[in-house]
Image: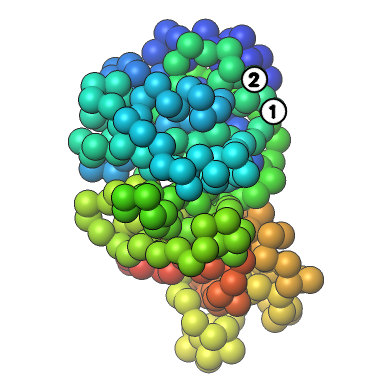
Amino acid sequence: MAEIGTDIEKAATLLSQGELVAIPTETVYGLAGNALNVEAVAKIFSAKNRPQFDPLIVHVPSLALARNYVTAIPKKAERLAQLFWPGPLTLVLEKKDETIPALVTSGLKTVGFRSPDHPLTRKLLTALPFPVAAPSANPFGYVSPTTPQHVNEQLGDKISYILDGGVCTIGIESTIIGFEGNDPVVLRLGGLSLERIEAVTGNIKVHVHSTSNPLAPGQLKSHYAPGKSLKLGTLEELLQEYPAHTSGILSFKHDFHSPHQRILSPSGNPEEAARNLFQYLRDFDKMPVDVILAELLPDEGLGRAINDRLKRAAAVDNS
């Protein structure tokens, strides 16, 4: 198992040596490596068993550092970064040739940048002379980690150190925005709501469709899945089809009085639901249930991103 601690200097040293370190963010824990070191980036793909056609997000302390690696930054990207960085927003920008290795971008001419909002990781990024590539610190396709223990349970034998930043405060991955010319396009729904983005940009296209050649992480049809099959629908109807005593129930706010139930937010708060989503999906893997029954949230605010994760988890065949 990996060592867990809060030693920023140790984390920086390991990253400088080409090793991998799990880092906390406000969204989920990331598996970090030197984004300019191809060998370190290859270790990320290997540790996660991640296909190399799925690009990585590069983490920087500020937009100023990102400028070194891109050809231009659209005005709306500048505005979004001013308002929402640090925070759960990734901006996909056209990269300068040879500045970021092709392995990071899966051969694409664009690269996603994010400035995470976590004090430990911000101190770490400021101390490093290079940006870090950092997808979620879990095996590819599985539920993302929101605590150091989640990381250690699944990747503890493949990484050097886990920087302990406690429980992630948002709990789902960043929203990803790309650009068609100067017009922003949502490529992945996430921890920054569509409503907050559109308050700045006006109406915005949403292209989060499934693809075998993703332009950004989290666009594959099957993703974010627990170890057991997840069925999505109306819980009352699902419970008529599947036996209650062998089914896990994931509800938004209603109590079904089941011994194998998790309620995302008894008060009906989407932000609380987002914080609990991945932990609760993990909980079912340790319960004596054969299947997980889940329902969608109202399709607004962070409910959109939660629904996106549930739909992709339900698309995975665990039979």
**Residue visible at 30% across and 21% down in the picture:** 99
Tell me: 132 left or right of 29.
left
Q: Distance between the residues labelled 2 and 1?
A: 6 Å
Residue 202: percent from the left, percent from the top?
52, 63
Residue 203: percent from the left, percent from the top?
48, 67
Q: Are marks 2 and 1 in contact (CB under 8 Å)?
A: yes
> Is the residue marked by circle 2 packed among few (<14), some (14-19), or many (20+) residues within 10 Å?
some
Vertical order, 239 against 126 (above or below):
below
Residue behind mark 1:
119
Residue 117: percent from the left, percent from the top?
64, 36
Q: Is mark 1 on a helix, strand or loop?
A: helix
Residue 77: percent from the left, percent from the top?
47, 44
Q: Nearer the viewer, residue 182 or 100?
A: 182
Q: What residue type is labelled 1?
A: Pro
Quarter of image, res 52:
top left
Residue 92: give its label: none
> Is the residue marked by circle 1 packed among few (<14), some (14-19), or many (20+) residues within 10 Å?
few
Residue behind mark 2:
123
Q: What element carries label 2?
A: helix
